[in-house]
Image (cartoon, coloured by chain):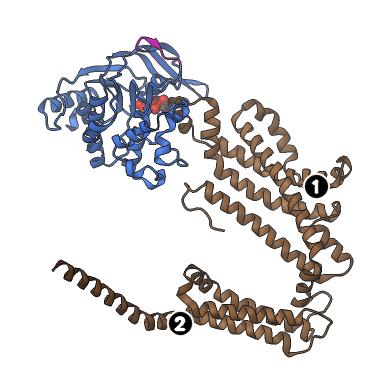
Chain colours: A blue, B brown
């Protein structure tokens, strides 16, 4: 359905940016003691790549994403978007959080319009909001308020709110983590379709191994906090992928082994 | 063939409609009798009230007894007609049926009041005036009462709007800026909890006029709760909203105007309600003590002349005004906070 809507939607040039994470370390001060969260993390994401970060809960994945988004500055190291250092938030890097965090006082349409409004270009570009809503299949709900939406619909609105800005890097922080498994499967396919169509670079955080393998070109596995890269795995399977693909099952087994969970497999 | 079947369908539909109407009439009579019945009883009760005004002679000298009785009969007739017209009045009818028990009870109360005061004097007289003497105030003392109402509304509105505006702006500034909070917070803690009426004596001789002094006090009484609640509203906005807005390219002004303020609005309204309550109290006291106009002053004046009917009349007007103001605020809130679910209905 999404793929179909995409065919009619306004098409934008493929705009994926590269992302370089160079020797990033970060820590938090908690009650006078220092909690190291990221320890010398290095990797590069190619333009248009679908990149997944996998790791146990609390290891520092969300922290890394906040640094990439520019919401916080790292203690040391540099982040580069297309070679330029990241100094603050910018709508070319948009985050979809685990909670949809829609503004409850705005209708669906006005929530999606948020970015254009904040940048002062809404008046001339209203059709982009309509197109983004079409893209996620929620045009009929344009006048609904967030409390009237289901969890999956709310997360679709959050996705539309991000996509309306034509991001160069889409940052997804466990966006499907709180959804029921059926909605999750549907939305995984939708996200792949959107990514293929638009060509933005995607940085996905997840703790679901299967999800990472189903969606991403490349998967980085973090160990426990402070996060350090344990493995860097290329997933060389064409799209659309099949969940029963034996190659994915094989990769899954080795990743679970890295995380010390292979005994349960 | 097709025309035939079409007309047949129409005929069928028509007869079905008629059937429904026919079977509907006795049905609706049978089932709507209990609510309609209350309407009839209410109508009868108002007739009773009218008769109670005329049946016995007044024990005092009141000029509006006959007009009061006539008004009661008109009321009764209106209720009766509306009840008989029933569902033809649509929404009005639904409202009437809902209020019928109240109409009934008010007529009974008025009758009791009339009998207990004007007819048999069970309640001591100057202190408990009969309904017709209050009507007399509304008709004979109207100009003065209207002047008082206008004076009160002007004073209250001016003070409230100033207080609410200043309180809102202060609250947003404290909630937003640490340095503003540093300077304003201690002042707020020191002065805020003081009842605004405590300032009365000082305010009346430091301000150029009693009117400006009262405006200031009403603004003060309104401003404190509005400030505190706006502040707490702004302070409690989840950081997640700011993060979302910032990644979408929001500047600080956008964060204040389009994130912090809308998110804090439910709190702001709580402050506005509290401010309205305490400013009413200040208004009445200020009018009684310093301002030579308004309903508070009218009350005071009536007391001086032992004009108890005037006091009751003024009290009734005052309560209607206060209730009206609260209703207005509720309406405004329901409009602005339509996105909230499960809000209290006034
Ligand atoms: N703002 C913060 N202040 C203090 N500690 C934090 C803050 N944000 C995250 N942390 C801590 O950093 C660690 C990593 O958090 P996070 O990046 O959210 O993990 P993940 O997303 O991988 O589950 C956690 O132990 C968390 O308690
Ligand atoms: Mg996280």
User: Magenta: predominant secondary structure element?
Assistant: loop
Density class for disc 2 (Cα within 10 Å; few <14, some 14-19, many ≥20) is few
Q: Which residues are magenta?
A: A82-87
Q: Is residue B88 left or right of residue B42?
A: left
Secondary structure beneath label 1 = helix
- Image quarter (top left, top right, bottom left or bottom right) of the C terminus of chain B: bottom right
- For label 1, the residue is B214
**Is A85 colored magenta in this rendering?**
yes
Q: Is residue B234 left or right of residue A196?
A: right
How many numbered discs, if any?
A: 2
- The answer to which of B18 and A208 lies nearer the viewer is B18
- The answer to which of A253 and B209 lies nearer the viewer is B209
Using the rendered view, name the quadrant where residue B229 is placed. top right
Residue sitting at 56 percent across and 76 percent down?
Answer: B101
Taking A82 as reference, is B29 above or below it?
Answer: below
Q: Residue A35 at what x, y percent from top left? A: 44, 21
Q: Residue A166 at what x, y percent from top left? A: 34, 24
Q: CA distance from mark 2 to mark 1?
A: 55 Å
Taking A19 as reference, is B15 above or below it?
Answer: below
Q: Nearer the viewer, mark 2 or mark 1?
A: 2
Using the rendered view, name the quadrant where residue A243 is placed. top left
Is label 1 within 8 A of ligand 1 (CB to nearest ligand atom)?
no
Density class for disc 1 (Cα within 10 Å; few <14, some 14-19, many ≥20) is many
Chain of the residue displaying label 2: B
Q: Residue B171 at what x, y percent from top left? A: 64, 36
Using the rendered view, name the quadrant where residue B292 is placed. bottom right
**Is A104 colored magenta in this rendering?**
no
- The answer to which of B187 and A114 lies nearer the viewer is A114
Chain of the residue displaying label 1: B
Q: Which mark is residue B33?
A: 2
Q: Residue B57 at what x, y percent from top left? A: 78, 89
Give ligand 1's quarter of the image: top left
């Amino acid at each position: 359905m999404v793929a179909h809507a995409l065919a009619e939607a306004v098409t934008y040039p493929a705009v994926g940016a590269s992302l370089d994470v160079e020797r990033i370390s970060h820590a938090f001060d908690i009650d006078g003691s220092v909690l190291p969260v990221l320890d010398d993390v290095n990797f590069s994401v190619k333009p248009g790549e679908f990149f997944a970060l996998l790791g146990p809960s609390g290891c520092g994945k969300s922290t890394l994403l906040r640094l990439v988004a520019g919401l916080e500055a790292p203690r040391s190291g540099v982040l580069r978007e297309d070679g330029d250092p990241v100094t603050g938030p910018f709508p070319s890097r948009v985050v979809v959080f685990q909670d949809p965090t829609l503004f409850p006082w705005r209708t669906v349409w006005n929530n999606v319009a948020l970015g254009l409004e904040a940048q002062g270009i809404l008046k001339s570009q209203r059709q982009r909001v309509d197109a983004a809503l079409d893209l996620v299949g929620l045009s009929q709900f344009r006048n609904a308020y967030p409390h009237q939406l289901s969890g999956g619909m709310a997360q679709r609105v959050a996705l539309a709110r991000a996509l309306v800005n034509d991001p160069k890097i889409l940052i997804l922080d466990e966006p499907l983590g709180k959804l029921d498994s059926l909605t999750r499967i549907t939305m995984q396919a939708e996200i792949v379709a959107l990514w293929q169509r638009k060509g933005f670079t995607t940085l996905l955080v997840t703790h679901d191994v299967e999800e990472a393998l189903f969606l991403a070109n490349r998967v980085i596995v973090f160990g426990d906090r402070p996060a350090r890269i344990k493995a860097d795995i290329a997933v060389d399977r064409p799209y659309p992928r099949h969940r029963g693909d034996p190659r994915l099952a094989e990769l899954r087994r080795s990743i679970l082994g890295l995380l010390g969970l292979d005994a349960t497999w | 063939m097709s025309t035939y079947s079409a007309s047949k369908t129409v005929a069928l539909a028509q007869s079905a409609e008629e059937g429904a109407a026919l079977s509907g009439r006795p049905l609706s009579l049978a089932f709507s009798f209990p609510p309609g019945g209350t309407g009839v009883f209410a109508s009868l009760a108002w007739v009773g009230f009218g008769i109670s005004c005329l049946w016995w002679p007044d024990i005092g000298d009141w000029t509006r007894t006959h007009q009061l009785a006539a008004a009661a009969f008109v009321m009764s007739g209106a209720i009766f007609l509306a009840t008989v017209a029933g569902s033809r009045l649509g929404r009005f009818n639904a409202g009437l049926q809902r209020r019928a028990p109240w109409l009934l009870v008010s007529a009974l109360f008025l009758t009791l009041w009339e009998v207990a005061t004007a007819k048999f004097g069970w309640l001591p007289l100057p202190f408990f005036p009969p309904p017709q003497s209050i009507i007399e105030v509304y008709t004979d003392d109207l100009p003065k009462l209207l002047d008082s109402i206008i004076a009160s509304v002007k004073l209250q509105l001016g003070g409230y709007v100033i207080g609410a505006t200043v309180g809102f702006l202060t609250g947003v500034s404290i909630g937003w800026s640490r340095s503003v909070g540093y300077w304003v917070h201690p002042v707020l803690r020191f002065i805020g909890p003081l009842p605004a009426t405590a300032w009365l004596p000082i305010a009346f001789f430091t301000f150029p006029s009693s009117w400006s002094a009262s405006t200031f006090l009403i603004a003060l009484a309104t401003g404190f709760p509005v400030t505190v609640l706006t502040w707490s509203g702004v302070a409690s906005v989840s950081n997640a909203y700011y993060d979302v807005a910032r990644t979408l390219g929001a500047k600080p002004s956008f964060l204040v105007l389009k994130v912090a303020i809308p998110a804090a609005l439910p709190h702001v309204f709580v402050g506005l309600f509290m401010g309205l309550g305490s400013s009413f109290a200040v208004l009445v006291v200020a009018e009684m003590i310093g301002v030579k106009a308004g309903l508070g002053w009218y009350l005071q004046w009536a007391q001086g002349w032992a004009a108890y009917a005037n006091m009751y009349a003024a009290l009734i007007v005052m309560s209607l005004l206060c209730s009206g103001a609260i209703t207005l605020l509720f309406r405004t809130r329901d409009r602005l906070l339509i996105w909230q679910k499960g809000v209290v209905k006034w």
